[in-house]
Image (tube, rainbow, N blue to C red):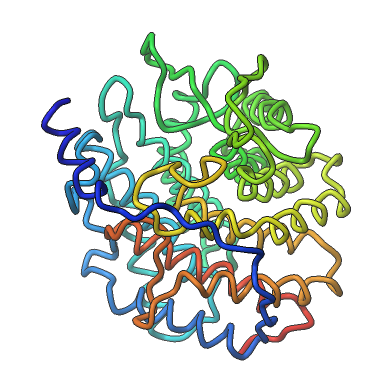
């Protein structure tokens, strides 16, 4: 075993055996007042921890647990996390302090360098490109950024990240963050959830004229649809020939709870009419019914070590996109669903305001806190639950 591998594994050697939570305890729905307070704590933490240059995360390795990744990956994760935090400010109720922080974050998005490929297998710069592109598109749709100069700058910024996505879209049509041997300039591996999260932004880019080739979106939609399984799950990646590896497989529903939400949402908002409200409800019901398997993985420090190969970082990613999926339902239903979701989001928030679902790094704190603020903000914009 190499020294690097030994250093990565030793801190976890004394972990106690994983405990399986019993059936999820009955959780009392959380009303809008408590959700607003939690949302504001998350936003206050983001304001207090924003750097002078408008960014948040460090962009360097924060500990020995991630020694195996390329140096560039830490900057790519910073770009992605900062984009999520920027979107949290964008979709929050505006105050003078939040607006000032948003302006600084947007300027940083414009001027920061784009991430690059880390090495042959480590293509984590895909994360930075995906979320920075999504962020730029959402900013361009906001009423506060509609001057000609602002629109031109956002088009240029989005174009830089879109260029990366066009370069690394796999032959199958999707995106991911690693490459499989034989390593190539255009990666050959992709995942359902990376691809799904960018579908709505690609659709808007087509409408805006920022994306000229309609086939880019069509290939990505087709990829996600091909990952849909008969049991309601979405496979982690496209596996036309099923792998038989036991009952606790990541592609069973209990390992797909977060992917179901982002894939349904991404397909629906990019024009796929097969994603009906009934299908969205079914996915959300599965999310709540089997939530204990996400809970079992939260804060476990080794990726995919929990039951059904769930990883800690599935948690807030999945809860954010569950809140997005709820927004696809008729308005009169949304508050009931959000009230069920809010206390589960809150489990990951600390007293200081930030949130964590995996190891404690700066990019994780920023991304998780952004997801908390975004998910709670969506639930405060339902029409039946009024915000400030």
Write the residue at 25% across / 46% down.
13
Write the residue at 42% across / 51% down.
153
Q: Quick one: 343 or 133, which is closer to the camera?
A: 343
| One can see residue 323 in this view | yes
Quick check: 6 above or below 77?
above
Q: Where on the picture, by quarter, is residue 126?
A: top left
Quadrant into which the N terminus falls: top left
Q: Quick one: 168 or 10, which is closer to the camera?
A: 10
Q: Is residue 245 left or right of residue 8?
A: right
The picture places residue 229, in percent across and down from the top left corner, at 75, 32
Quadrant into which the C terminus falls: bottom right
The picture places residue 272, in percent across and down from the top left corner, at 80, 39
Q: Where on the picture, by quarter, is residue 231?
A: top right
Q: Where on the picture, by quarter, is residue 246?
A: top right
Q: Is residue 53 left or right of residue 41?
A: left
The picture places residue 120, in percent across and down from the top left corner, at 29, 20
Quick check: 183 above or below 93?
above
Q: Quick one: 94 or 266, which is closer to the camera?
A: 266
């Amino acid at each position: 075993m190499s020294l690097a591998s030994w250093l990565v594994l030793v801190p976890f050697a004394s972990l106690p055996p994983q405990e399986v939570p019993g059936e999820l305890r009955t959780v009392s729905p959380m009303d809008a007042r408590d959700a607003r307070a939690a949302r504001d704590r998350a936003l206050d933490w983001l304001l207090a921890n924003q750097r002078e240059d408008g960014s948040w995360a460090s962009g360097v390795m924060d500990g020995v647990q991630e020694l195996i990744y390329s140096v560039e990956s830490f900057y790519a994760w910073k770009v992605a996390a900062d984009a999520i935090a920027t979107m949290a400010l964008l979709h929050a109720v505006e105050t003078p302090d939040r607006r000032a922080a948003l302006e600084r974050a947007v300027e940083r998005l414009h001027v920061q360098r784009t991430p690059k490929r880390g090495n042959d297998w480590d293509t984590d710069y895909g994360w930075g490109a995906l979320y920075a592109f999504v962020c730029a598109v959402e900013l361009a749709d906001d009423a506060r950024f509609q001057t000609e100069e602002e629109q031109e700058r956002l088009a240029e910024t989005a174009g830089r990240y879109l260029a990366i996505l066009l370069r690394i879209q796999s032959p199958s049509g999707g995106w991911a963050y690693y490459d499989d041997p034989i390593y190539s300039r255009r990666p050959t591996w992709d995942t359902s959830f990376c691809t799904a999260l960018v579908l709505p932004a690609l659709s808007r880019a087509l409408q805006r004229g920022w994306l000229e080739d309609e086939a880019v979106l069509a290939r990505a939609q087709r990829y996600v649809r091909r990952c849909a399984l008969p049991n309601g799950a979405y496979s982690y990646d496209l596996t036309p020939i099923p792998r038989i590896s036991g009952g606790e497989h990541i592609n069973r529903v209990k390992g797909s709870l977060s992917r179901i939400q982002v894939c349904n949402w991404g397909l629906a908002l990019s024009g796929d009419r097969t994603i009906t409200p009934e299908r969205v409800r079914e996915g959300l019901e599965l999310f709540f019914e089997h939530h204990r398997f996400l809970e079992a993985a939260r804060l476990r420090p080794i990726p995919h070590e929990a039951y059904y190969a769930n990883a800690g970082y599935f948690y807030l990613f999945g809860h954010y996109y569950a809140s997005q999926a709820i927004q696809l339902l008729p308005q009169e239903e949304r508050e009931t669903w959000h009230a069920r979701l809010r206390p589960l989001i809150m489990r990951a928030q600390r007293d200081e305001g930030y949130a964590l679902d995996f190891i404690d790094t700066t990019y994780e704190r920023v991304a998780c806190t952004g997801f908390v603020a975004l998910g709670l903000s969506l639930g405060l914009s339902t029409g039946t639950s009024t915000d400030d």
